[in-house]
């Protein structure tokens, strides 16, 4: 259980660029939130929310403020309490990360991290560490939203530069095919994608990971699954609602 449940939490830390990113114009549907049930071997283990707030000002630039959170259910918390929060600030014009803030509370482990992305000078500041990055590098949350706003096609792979674990990784995302998925939020035509990572910050690499996105311009993640050492974990969409963040104020 100690290994399986943190893998559930990784679903909301994921939603996981190219050097041409700043030359393209992408837009998000702001003030929207997705609610999920987190399940371990079919049993409710917690809840998660991915929230797209309004456009805010950050360091003189316009940014999307993306919030994700995950909490363990009452019975899981007795064994292993989880209360994770991750905020990403995505540049509106370039659609790359400007800042990532993480507050991780898992069992006895706690961690608070703020990472600053200086895209113009191709640097990232992570605590006392400074690292070189390619222009357009994403964080572990903005990477998903960069992928989410693309025109996705079955059979096409994407490669995204992501800063995690103290260095830049090349995240590969495979688009596998179309499936119809039923969840408590409704039945959806979806496109199945598979992220392939060489780092553990987004998903624990205990097994295959798959994400089902609505097969339309919104690309809402309706189902996420990952095999772990014992059984599997999943995040199932239960509700799409207005963001409580309003205009980000």
Image: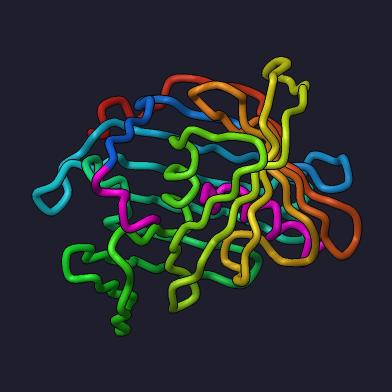
Expressed as whole percent of the image width and height from the top left, the position of residue 142 reads 42, 50
Task: Identify which residue is drawn at 62% across, 71% down.
Answer: 198
Expressed as whole percent of the image width and height from the top left, the position of residue 153 reads 59, 34
Magenta-colored segment: predominant secondary structure: helix
Expressed as whole percent of the image width and height from the top left, the position of residue 5 reads 74, 57
Up the image or down, 146 lies above or below 110; here it is above
Would residue 79 appear left or right of 99 to someone viewing this image?
A: right
Task: Identify which residue is drawn at 69% across, 64% down.
Answer: 204
Q: Residue furthest front?
A: 155
Confirm whether residue 113 shows in the render: yes
The foreground one among 72 and 191 is 191
- The colouring scheme, among rainbow, by chain, secondary structure or one colour, is rainbow
Q: Quadrant of residue 172?
A: bottom right
Q: Which residues are magenta?
A: 1-23
Task: Identify which residue is drawn at 64% across, 54% down.
Answer: 195
The foreground one among 225 and 56 is 225
Expressed as whole percent of the image width and height from the top left, the position of residue 72 reads 67, 48
Give the tally of numbered discs. Answer: 0
Up the image or down, 44 lies above or below 78; here it is above
Confirm whether residue 46 shows in the render: no
**Residue 21 included in the magenta stretch of the image:** yes
Quadrant that contains the N terminus = bottom right
Q: Residue furthest top?
A: 186
Task: Identify which residue is drawn at 69% across, 52% down.
Answer: 8
């Amino acid at each position: 259980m100690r290994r399986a449940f943190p893998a559930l939490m990784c679903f909301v830390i994921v939603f996981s660029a190219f050097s041409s990113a700043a030359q393209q114009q992408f837009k998000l549907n702001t003030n929207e939130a997705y609610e999920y049930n987190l399940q371990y071997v079919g049993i409710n283990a917690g809840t998660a929310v991915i929230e797209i707030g309004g456009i805010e000002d950050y360091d003189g630039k316009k940014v999307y403020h993306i919030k994700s959170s995950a909490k363990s259910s009452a019975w899981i918390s007795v064994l292993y309490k989880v209360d994770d929060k991750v905020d990403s600030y995505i540049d509106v014009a370039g659609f790359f990360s400007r800042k990532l803030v993480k507050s991780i509370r898992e069992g006895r482990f706690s961690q608070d991290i703020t990472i600053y992305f200086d895209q113009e000078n191709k640097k990232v500041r992570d605590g006392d560490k400074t690292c070189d990055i390619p222009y357009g590098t994403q964080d572990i949350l903005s990477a998903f939203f960069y992928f989410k706003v693309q025109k996705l096609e079955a059979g096409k792979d994407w490669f995204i530069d992501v800063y995690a674990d103290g260095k830049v990784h090349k995240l590969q995302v495979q688009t596998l095919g179309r499936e119809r998925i039923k969840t408590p939020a409704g039945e959806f035509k979806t496109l199945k994608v598979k992220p392939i990572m060489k780092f553990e910050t987004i998903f624990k690499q205990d097994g295959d990971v798959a994400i089902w996105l609505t097969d339309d311009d919104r690309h809402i993640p309706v189902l996420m699954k990952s095999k772990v050492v014992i059984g599997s974990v999943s995040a199932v969409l239960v509700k799409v609602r207005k963001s409580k963040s309003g205009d980000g104020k």
